[in-house]
Image (cartoon, rainbow, N blue to C red):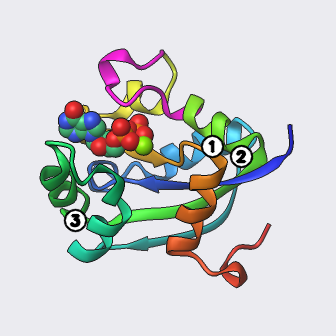
Amino acid sequence: MAVQRTLSIIKPDATRRNLTGAINQRFEEKGLRIVAQKRMWLTDEQAKQFYAVHAERPFYGELVDFMTSGPVVVQVLQGEDAVAKNREIMGATNPANADDGTIRKDFAESIEANSVHGSDSEDNAKIEVAFFFSETEIVG
Ligand code: IDP
Ligand code: MG
């Protein structure tokens, strides 16, 4: 294992319910460090580009609408095996299938409004981190 960085997004359903601190606590208590963070309201263009990999999926349009429905918090998490560790902390995409104690089990509203995004591979983490942050904004 090695120290990695991964991109996390606290989604609009969670910022609306004032859950930023509660979610950040999950990352920190499990050993991930928040080494960059900013709150922003994604434009339609940004959300479409970020989720371009899902452009052919039937839920793409709704996903873009959801992700632009309120503020998000984009952040870089750093730690040992951070990509896989964050996916564990997040839980399954559908909260109905998420393990106990995961963010999505405890906070998600639905398969779409599932509170957090996390990169799914080290390669995608690099691409996604660079989508939102310059190197000088990340302080490890
Ligand atoms: P992930 O976020 O667990 O990596 P992905 O399959 O990459 O899941 O899907 C990206 C996002 O698209 C999900 O987090 C969720 O917000 C939304 N999504 C995924 N599957 C569905 C679906 O079947 N209906 C509606 N939204 C979905
Ligand atoms: Mg994904």
Q: Quadrant of residue 104?
A: top left
Taking the image as shown, residue 133 lies to the left or right of residue 20, namely: right
Residue occupying the far right of the picture: 2
Q: Give the vertical position of 123 relative to 2 (above or below).
A: below
- The stretch in magenta equals 89-99
Gap between marks 1 and 3, in whole Å? 24 Å
Q: Residues within 10 Å of mark 3 (few under 14, many from 20)?
A: many
Residue on which disc 2 sits: 32
| Camera-side mark, 1 or 3 | 3
- Callout 2: SS: loop
The answer to whether the residues at label 2 and label 1 have Cβ atoms under 8 Å apart is yes
Q: Quadrant of the C terminus?
A: bottom right
Taking the image in four quarters, ligand 1 sits in the one at top left
Foreground of the two, 63 or 95: 63
Judged from the image, the secondary structure of the residue bearing numbered disc 3 is loop
Residue underneath mark 1: 27
